[in-house]
Image: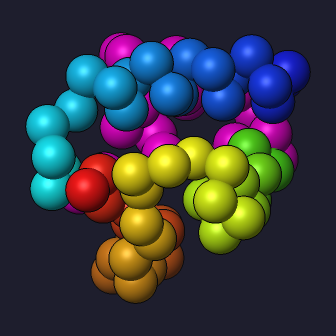
Amino acid sequence: MDYDSTLSEARKAIDGLSDNTVFEVKDLFEGTKWNKYPKGERIGFGRYFSNKVRNGCIEGIVRLERGKDNHTRYQKI
């Protein structure tokens, strides 16, 4: 998985979200595309995405608490 190109794809999906939408990283990918990546790559990209949000590289997104399934949730503001 190329994290930079995957991040570009995620940013396009974020642009299409309404304000105040709560989402998980997997929600940014259509159909089963997210599940086609091996589990280790999904986890790695999730960390990468989270770090980008924390560092302010992805504007308009805030990190929320983890859900019951232990997945990090985000909100577009």
Point out residue 40 in the picture as x, y percentages from the top left corner. Answer: 82, 47
Residue positioned 65% across, 69% down in the render: 54
Scheme of colours in the image: rainbow
Residue positioned 26% across, 56% down in the render: 77
Q: Which residues are magenta?
A: 22-43
Residue 42 on the magenta segment: yes
Residue positioned 14% across, 37% down in the render: 18
Left or right of 6? Residue 2 is: right
Q: Nearer the viewer, residue 15 or 1?
A: 15
Residue 10 on the magenta segment: no
Q: Is residue 24 visible?
A: no
* On screen, residue 5 above or below 74: above
* On screen, residue 39 above or below 63: above
Q: Nearer the viewer, residue 16 or 1?
A: 16
Q: Is residue 75 visible?
A: yes
Residue positioned 74% across, 16% down in the render: 5
Point out residue 76 in the picture as x, y percentages from the top left corner. Answer: 29, 52
Q: Nearer the viewer, residue 48 or 44?
A: 48
Question: How many numbered discs, if any?
Answer: 0
The quarter of the displayed image where residue 42 is located: top right
Q: Quadrant of the N terminus?
A: top right
